[in-house]
Amino acid sequence: MEECYMKISVVIAYHDEKQYIKDCLASLAEQTFQDFEVILVCDGCEAPEEGIPETLNIVTVMQEEKGVAGARNAGIEKTQGEYVVFLDADDYLAEDTLEALAEKADGETLVYGPKTATWYSRKVYQDNGEELDEQNDTNDGSGEEKATKRNPEDPYDFLVAHTKNWQNISVLGLLIPRKLLMENQIRFCEELVYDSDIPVLMEVLAKAPKTVYQEKGTYIKRKHNDPINLPSLLQKKDAAKKVAEAMKSYRLASPFADGENAKVFHYRFAMCLVTMISPYMIESKAAEKKETARELKQTLEILGKDRWADIPMKHHPRKLIAYGLAGDAAKIVKKTRNHARRQTLFRVCTSRAKCKRYLYEKVFSKMKMLDDMVIFESFFGKSYSDSPKYIFEYMNETYPGKYRYMWVNAGKKLNLPYPSKQMKRFSFKYFFYMARAKYIVFNGRQPQYFIKRKGNVFLETWHGTPLKKLVFDMEDVTTASPLYKEQFYIQTRSWDYLVAPNRFSEDVFRHAFMYDGKMLETGYPRNDILYCQDKEKRMREIKEELHLPQDKKIILYAPTWRDDEFYGHAKYKFTLQLDLAKMQKELGDEYIILLRTHYFIADVLDLSEYEGFAYNLSKYDDIARLYLISDVLITDYSSVFFDYANLRRPMLFFTYDLEKYRSVLRGFYIDVEEELPGPMLMTTDEVIGALQNIEKVVTEYSDKYTAFCDKYCAWEDGTAAKKVVETVFSDKSNK
């Protein structure tokens, strides 16, 4: 036997996962235990050029593409350690993982430890990943169950029983004696793309002289938030092959699954029959049904009818097992359909939300379309505002009586200036008209279950020029839904028109949204008011409406939310960093300040001690009207400054957490130091100083302001609503 030079060999199968490998290797470089080597198998790709820590002892293996199984097998042959650990290139380890595993090792013991799953990069996970993952638990089946639900002392219960699906059964993160692999010639089946781990895990569990659980040290499985461009194996749409592999992997593993402890393995396959194999048979063609049933019969017969009877399970999987043993495809399909119908009926009868959805999909969507009805929604029904408002008003003024209008609200009636109906979001009325209206105008995303009927016209106005990275340009999605990218992609396929405020935004929308539909190069309708001919009159009226003094200058402070600071879905925290007491003392004779936080922010700011100086207008519907009355804008990373620039008034940027926001949370599309038409300020004192010398600021940033407006405001001229309406509602293809 060849001499081993180190205790652990870490085998990584790498297939050009450039966006992940840096975190993977960095986690190894920072291990508290350093007696290990890394076998990096480049499977049909070039070796990574960046993110390779110099301190790592890396053996690089180059080979033609053979898949994960082939790469791991090649890695095994190069190992020299006493133990082998398999690590995927898109995963990483807690810094004490190898040390913790090594503590329990004695040369022959198989050591396993906790696993967790995260949507986030290593940096984000280390900062607050556990909190984010708990909040963003989508139950998508791609991660591990929480260890508290398992018996850690039983390797079958811990590693097999509580995985969320068949493909999650894995050898990743186990400390496997190299001797066990070599003497038993345990290798991964290279014919298996998705399920090659399963036979290996069952064999090493069966043949290991001893297995030990180590509660310390965590393997961190990174879930992919972009299944469109960068799907994980689990996310790939390959139902036929996945079903075939599930059965083959079960057949290969079954000889090593014997005894009471291994009953959970057979139970997991029964659940695979319920969740993957039988649903596939419903959708497959007759010949495929027959072939799947034949193969399933052969697979189930390995255990035998009598042994299957001993596996504890409920009625539905037990009947599917019986039909599978009989090779009866028709009964499997019928049983699966009836079971699904009963579940649907139960949900519809016990849940108002499910009932509404069912009626929307099965009844309302089949009814005659209302060709003259237009539905408007702004910020999920929370306000009468933004571009939908100005499109609505233009249509009423230009085409009185031609269309019927319906506004979505969030439960509170909107104050509308023209005759129209309203409906509460997610009410029965909402589902009824969403299914039947011809035209739908939103400034955000439609619900995921929206059905695009033939003849529907979907006008998406969006809600800002992008400063922060959007959707497919984001690495981590630290908002409340890590499935954002997949959901967004599906939703944008329904958009017929997307409004762009400038050329820059059009370009960003194309790649960030992966949108190839019609783009309206009009500017934003919501900015039309900034070009109105009666500014002074409107400004007086708005100040009167809000009970603001007419003789003082107005500061508008409009910060955005922070992706990683939230209470719940779309409910973000906000801590006021400006010292209002100091600002009131220094500026109160000349200025008042209006605070307008993002609609996602849940905190209610108490400004009672600054009465007469600070006003909380976060609930005010139309921020464009606040732009109009403001003399100076203070913001941070909100897109409001792109709109405010149309007024050519001074802007200050209070960017106290710039580095964190830029490098960790979102990142920017533009070089803020070079392009922003105003100073970037870090403290309240700097803000006060800039306001006290605002004319100097205006002069200093004059050239930048001009260049900024030329780039981002060139399409705005006060007629955007007109252009949008004339295009969408006059398009003959929409008739």
Image: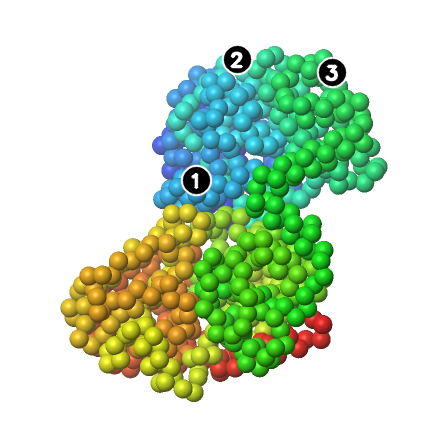
Q: Position of residue 354 (x, y in %)?
A: 59, 44
- Place of residue 327 in the rendered image (x, y in percent of width and height, measured from the top left): 80, 25
Q: Are marks 2 and 3 in contact (CB under 8 Å)?
A: no
Q: Residue 231 versus residue 397: which sits nearer the camera?
A: 397
Query: Which residue is at the front of the view, 114 or 357?
Result: 357
In the displayed structure, would residue 355 be above or below residue 38?
below
583 left or right of 543? left
Q: Disc 1 residue type?
A: Glu
Q: Earlier in the sequence, mark 1 or mark 3?
A: 1
| Residue placed under numbered mark 3 in the picture | 305
Upstream in the sequence, badge 1 or badge 2? 1
Determine whether 353 is above or below 243 in the image. Answer: below
The image quarter in which residue 1 lies: top right
- Tag 3 secondary structure: helix
Residue 90 seen in this snapshot: no
Q: Quadrant of residue 724?
A: bottom right
Which element carries disc 1, helix, strand or loop?
A: helix
Question: Residue, x 65% and y 38% (percent of image)?
Answer: 345
Q: In the rendered image, which residue does mark 2 sit on?
A: 209
Q: Is residue 234 above or below residue 458?
A: above
Residue shown at 60% from the left, 32% from the top: 165
Amino acid marked by disc 2: Pro
**Marks 1 and 2 close (CB-CB < 8 Å):** no
Q: Out of 326 and 592, give the one closest to the viewer.
A: 592
What residue is at 46 percent from the left and 18 percent from the top? 153
Reading the image, the residue beneath label 1 is: 134
In this rendering, would 363 be left or right of 173? Answer: right
Tally of marks = 3
